[in-house]
Image (tube, rainbow, N blue to C red):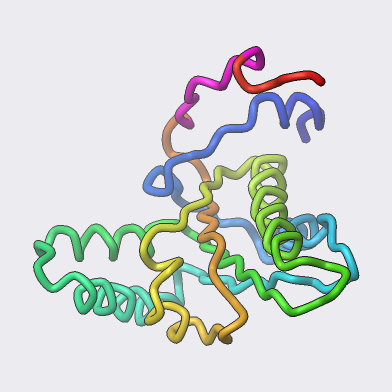
Amino acid sequence: MPDALELLKTRNSSRAQDLGPPAPTDAELSAMLTIAARVPDHGLMKPWRFIVLSKETRAPLVEKLAANFRAGNPAAPEQDVEKQKLRFGGSPVIVVVVSRTAPNPKVPEIEQLLSAGAACMNLLHAANALGFGANWLTGWAAFDQSSKELFGLKASEQIVGFIHIGTPTADAFNRPRPDLSEIVSKI
């Protein structure tokens, strides 16, 4: 296991299409989800939940997502529909992270939403720490009403990430990182 600071300093996202088998074992995935849930949670509200989509069982779901994409984009060429099938069908595991906010006088909804985002980030870190590649995606399916229905989300829930996890088949893209002098100010 890499040193924690080194892991944080060198973290990269693998492209979802560059994630192949083997998938994490059930024990590894459970460890990742345990770490994902270990985030700031003011009021102990657990304002997130996880839906695990294994490659072996998600083919019918991928077809429904493609049909939803087609319904929402009737002029889209067939290659765009096929691209959506690859997007949701390729990675060994996809974890759908769902934010579930609730009115609370002490915990504003933005805090609850940010906690769900922190769960996504912890899941990426956990996957990388265990030697897997991961990628946090959203896109149309995260915001589409038909997807909310497909995943059984309530009105107070929204998808904040599709976390693709698998074994990298190519080097992760190392994008340029911001110069701290451009993003940090002191008062």
Image position of 38 (left or right of 63):
right
Q: Does the magenta-highlighted stretch encompass residue 61?
A: no
Q: Which residues are magenta?
A: 172-181
- Outermost residue, front direction? 187
Figure quadrant of residue 111: bottom right
Give the residue displayed 77% in from the left and 66% down from the top: 108
Image position of 90 (left or right of 168):
left
Residue 63, percent across and down? 29, 77
- Identify which residue, 102 or 93, lies in the foreground: 102
Figure quadrant of residue 110: bottom right
Image position of 65 (left or right of 181):
left
- Identify which residue, 104 or 135, lies in the foreground: 104
Give the residue displayed 82% in from the left and 20% down from the top: 187
Residue 79, percent across and down? 13, 58
Residue 136, percent across and down? 53, 50
Residue 120, percent across and down? 65, 54
- Identify which residue, 5 or 157, lies in the foreground: 157
Residue 2 position (above or below residue 98): above
Residue 104 position (above or below residue 16): below
Residue 151 position (above or below residue 16): below
Give the residue displayed 55% in from the left and 67% down from the top: 96
Q: Does the magenta-highlighted stretch encompass residue 177?
A: yes
Give the residue displayed 78% in from the left and 35% down from the top: 1
The secondary structure making up most of the magenta span is loop
Residue 173 position (above or below residue 157): above
